Amino acid sequence: MDGYDKLLGDICDIVDQMNGLRDIAYKHYATLVADVIADQITDIKAIEKIMDGLCDFGDEKRFLDLYRSLCRHVYYRYPEIVGEHIVLFRMQWMTKDDELE
């Protein structure tokens, strides 16, 4: 195995590890969103922290789906927080040519 093949193998290992960490994060956030929807988490600061964390993964559809579910659930209680987070999400992840599905 030459240096290039070893480097490529190392990069593939790192990507696999990062994907594993994303899977763990998804399970964690899915549980938190389910807790919010079940009204087990109602503190606005805790909900904002969850929204902030989900926004960090906005480049992946499964996290975006969780984010949308959370926003829809808390919108009538906290419309200003949802509005602020949607603006932040768009600033971070969307270009002027993008549209939300």
Image: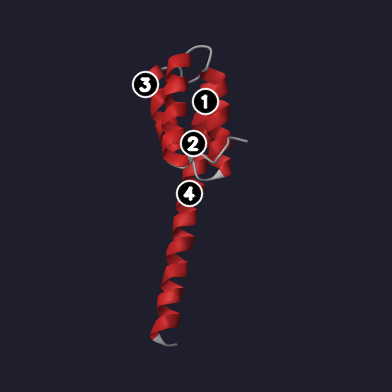
Type of amino acid under label 3: Lys
Please tell me whether mark 3 or mark 1 is closer to you in this view: 3
Question: 7 or 86, which lies in front?
Answer: 86
Label 2 element class: helix
Amino acid type for the residue under numbered disc 1: Asp
Percent across and percent down for residue 7 are 40, 76
State the residue lying farthest toward the right: 101
Residue 41's spot in the image, x, y percent?
Answer: 46, 21
Q: Nearer the viewer, mark 4 or mark 1?
A: 4
- Please tell me which residue lies in front, 41 or 48: 48
Q: Nearer the viewer, residue 22 or 91?
A: 91
**Among numbered discs 4 and 2, the one appearing first in the sequence:** 4
Q: Which residue is mark 1?
A: 35
**Mark 4 and mark 1 residues within 8 Å of each other at the beta carbon:** no
Q: Secondary structure at mark 3?
A: helix
Q: Amino acid at mark 4?
A: Arg
User: Can you tell which mark lies on residue 45?
Assistant: 3
Instruction: Work out how far the residue at label 2 is from the one at label 1, CA to CA, in angstroms.
Output: 10 Å
Mark 2 highlights which residue? 29
Task: Let me know if residue 74 appears in the view.
Answer: yes
Q: Is residue 48 left or right of residue 70?
A: left
Task: Point out the image quarter for the C terminus.
Answer: top right
Name which of mark 3 and mark 1 comes first in the sequence.
Answer: 1
Q: Residue shown at 47%/68% (left/top)?
A: 12
